Structure formats: structure tokens, C-alpha cells
Image (cartoon, rainbow, N blue to C red):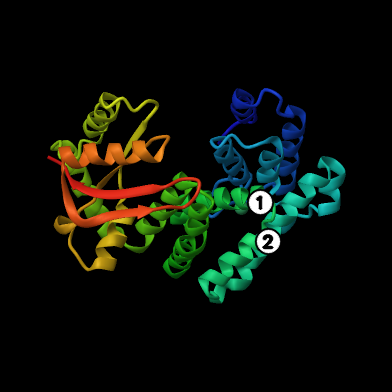
Amino acid sequence: MIRQTDLIEKIKSYDPEADEDAINRAYVYAMQKHGNQMRASGDLYISHPIEVAYKLTQYKLDTASIITALLHDTVEDTDATLDEIETLFGEEIRQLVDGVTKLNRLEIKSESNKQAENFRKLVVAMSRDLRVLLVKLADRLHNMETLDHIPKPEKRQRIARETLEIYAALAERIGMRRIKEELQDLAFKELFPEARESLVKRMDFLRKSGQNQVQKVEEILRDLVEGAGIKGARVYGREKKPFSIWKKMESKGIGFEQLADIVAFRVVVTTVSECYLALGLIHEKYHTIPGHLRIIFPRPRSTVISRFILP
Ligand code: MN
């Protein structure tokens, strides 16, 4: 279990001004309230809110979010009240804890599963403060990580489906890509373990046989744009995740071998003309796939997407 001092140290590392005293008080309060309650895993319940708080430190969230994470299940699952929380931690924390508690109740009521889009809208409307949603996403992530301890397969699968339809989708919408990918992967593991296993193996094989050399191509692209005098360009390469590969295979009805894009690169430049210059250079160097050039022009950023074949 993560210790109080580890949590404080982690927060202080990115926010030296963090209210250590308040965080310590919340830690102790949650610990006293949850008392001997247990998780399905056999761990003490308190380990859960602490894990959720710790996850949020990875996103460098503020003191109020961390405190909310520590308290997020106290109103629902113990004799703690919002009034008591307001007296001890102030009005802001009350509002945040109230928001997360309402989202939890919403989840229980919607077990019959309403339309996913309506449900997502409701969640967004109820988390007027984005921090409520962030705490909820970290909560769901930890619950997914410990999903194995839930004995009933139907229940595990329901939670996994809901994670995909609601929470991974919301994480994507607010730009939390890492949480989205982690949620998708954990849900994938529960719902389609064999498909996931086989994709993970194929990706490992490609990586080991040097066939998707993300780093190498990244360097080539970087040299290319820098060589053309484009200053301050950023180049990122990444390997697609098993879940998104699988989704594409499913939606297009194709096999892994026919899948064109296992790796993706992003070249970020400052002006539109540099963008087309970089595109021209890449097209000169690699074989592009006809019919796969897309130009999107939302302000303030324009995006050009092109597919090409790696050597
Ligand atoms: Mn929780």
C-alpha cells in the first residue's frame, strides 16, 4: 500500500505549495471512516482511495483533487456526511466530493444501460468541474486494475463494457490519452482475452524482428524536416495499442497482415507552409498509399494525414 509520506512526497515534487496538512488530514479521515472495510481483493478498503489519489499525482493535479480522491467513497460507503466534510475541508472539497458521489450513484442506477451517448452527456453535465471527472476516471482505472477479484464473470464484463462505452470515450474527449488507453486495454483483456493476447504477441514479434522501428523512423523524419530548415519541429512516433488495432480489424473486417498502420508518426510544425513542405519531403522519401491523404482545417490548427509505407 502507498504510504502517506510517499503520497505527500510525490505531490510536493511538482507542487511545493501543496497543502500538506490538509492532505494528511484527509488521509487520516478516510482511513478512520473506512476502518476495517475490505475490498473484494482482500485488501483494506482504504488502499483504493489512496491508489486513486496516487494516480492523480501522475497528472500533477492540485491539492483539492488529491483530497477529493482520498475522500471520494466516504459519503457513499461510510457514515461521513457532506456537512462534516465541508466543516473539515471547506466548501470546494464538499462540492467536488458531492460531484463524484453523484456520479457513483448514477452508475448504479444505470445498470440496465441507457444509451451510451446520453449517459456520457449526463456524466459531463454532472461534472461541471473537470476535476470531478478526473477523479472518477482514476477511480474507474483502479477498479479495472482490480477487476480480477470480482467473482461473477457477467459483472466483470458489464463493468468492462461500460468502461469502454462511457469512461474510455470520455477520457478521449477530454484529451487524457494515457488513461483512455489504459482503460481500453484493461477492458479488452476482460472481454476478448484471446484476441488481445494474440495481438500482443504479434506486436512483440514485430518489435523484436525490428520491423516497426519507431525510433529510427522518428530520427529520419526529424533529420528530414531539420535538413529543410524547418525550425522547432517536433516529431513523435508511436505504436498503436492492441485495442485500437483490433477495433480497426473488426470494423474493416480485415486481418492483421492487411492492416496498414501499426505505427503512426506526428510531425508538428508552426506554419501551414512548413506543414506542406514537410509533407512534400515525406512523400518524396516514402511510397505513399494513394487515396489516403486527408486534410483537416480546423482553426487554430490544420492537420494533414497521409499514409506511407515504411521501407
Ligand atoms: Mn471508488
Distance CA(mark 1)–CA(mark 2): 9 Å
Residue at left offset 53%, top offset 55%? 40
User: Residue at left 43%, top 48%?
Assistant: 182
Identify residue for label 1.
132
**Badge 1 or badge 2: first in the primary sequence:** 2
- Verify CB contact (< 8 Å) between mark 1 and mark 2: yes
- Answer above or below: position of 141 versus 104: above
Numbered circle sitting on residue 297: none
Tell me which residue sits at (73%, 50%) in the image: 96
Q: Amino acid at mark 2?
A: Met
Along the viewing direction, whichever of 234 and 117 lies nearer the viewer? 234
Judge whether residue 41 can be spotted in this image. no
Can residue 79 be seen? yes
Query: Dot 2: what SS?
Result: helix
Residue 297 drawn above or below residue 238: below
Where is 201 relative to 210, above or below?
Answer: below
How far across and down, in percent of the image, does residue 159 sit?
49, 63
Residue closest to the far front: 273
